Amino acid sequence: MKFKRPTNAAALSKEQKVWLLKDYVAHCRSIAETDSNALNQKVPRDAFRDLLDQVGELLLRESQTNTTSSGKVANFLDSTPLPQSMEKLLPREFRAYCLALNALKQWVAAEQAATDKFLLGGSIRKLCRAATETCVVTGDVLDSELELHHPSERRKTADCVEQART
């Protein structure tokens, strides 16, 4: 089955998007009032252990296949030989694995960007600024130059929580 990116069939108006964000900000504020650490929750990595194992196995299998059969990866490896001193240390399958891993990284970045746009579109910064002018944790006014906080961005929210405590 060929991959097809999920798309949102329900297009929202700018007003609907701002309303959703305002509601979300209010929700996060209410959580922050009782337990600001609750905004830093993450899914445990082992929750996706099976998926990650499957992806790893697929990368290894594809890397091996791509080095033994003719094709774009094998041609690329042939046309970009390494010095003999490195070739012994970086086997062909490992080089193909690195290329596949890089391709996966680029794919993940593109998919993450698409998921960011799924509900609210590509103008999220402007929409967020229209939805709130204050930090959900501290209540401080957000300077126009300040990076917006997002509850799922652990480091940023943790920094904000730490600043609120001091």
Image: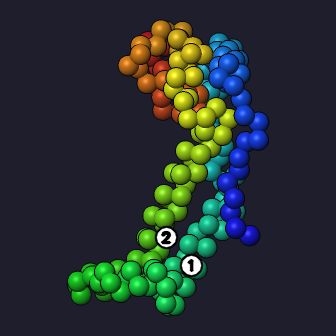
Q: Is residue 81 left or right of residue 148?
A: left
C-alpha distance separating marks 2 and 1: 8 Å
Q: Is residue 137 left or right of residue 3?
A: left
Q: Secondary structure at mark 2?
A: helix
- Residue at the location (64% across, 32% down)? 120
The percent coordinates of residue 101 (x first, y second) are 48, 66
Query: Image height check: is 139 above or below 88?
Result: above
Q: Secondary structure at mark 1?
A: helix
The answer to which of 162 and 143 lies nearer the viewer is 143
- Residue at the location (61% across, 20% down)? 36
Q: Which mark is residue 100?
A: 2
* Residue 34 visible in the shown view: no
* Residue 160 visible in the shown view: yes
Query: Image height check: is 156 above or below 31?
Result: below
- Residue at the location (47% across, 8% down)? 141
The percent coordinates of residue 103 (x first, y second) are 48, 65
The percent coordinates of residue 131 (x first, y second) are 60, 16
Q: Quadrant of the N terminus?
A: bottom right
- Residue at the location (70% across, 67% down)? 2
Picture quadrant where residue 11 is located: top right
Residue bearing mark 1: 62
Q: Which mark is residue 159?
A: none
Category of crowding for the residue at label 2, using alpha-carbon neighbours closer than 10 angstroms: few (below 14), some (14–19), many (at least 20): some
Q: Quadrant of the C terminus?
A: top left
Category of crowding for the residue at label 1, using alpha-carbon neighbours closer than 10 angstroms: few (below 14), some (14–19), many (at least 20): some
Q: Are marks 2 and 1 in contact (CB under 8 Å)?
A: yes
The answer to which of 52 and 7 lies nearer the viewer is 7
Please state which amino acid type lies under the numbered disc 2.
Answer: Ala
Please state which amino acid type lies under the numbered disc 1.
Answer: Glu
How are the residues colored?
rainbow
Q: Earlier in the sequence, mark 2 or mark 1?
A: 1
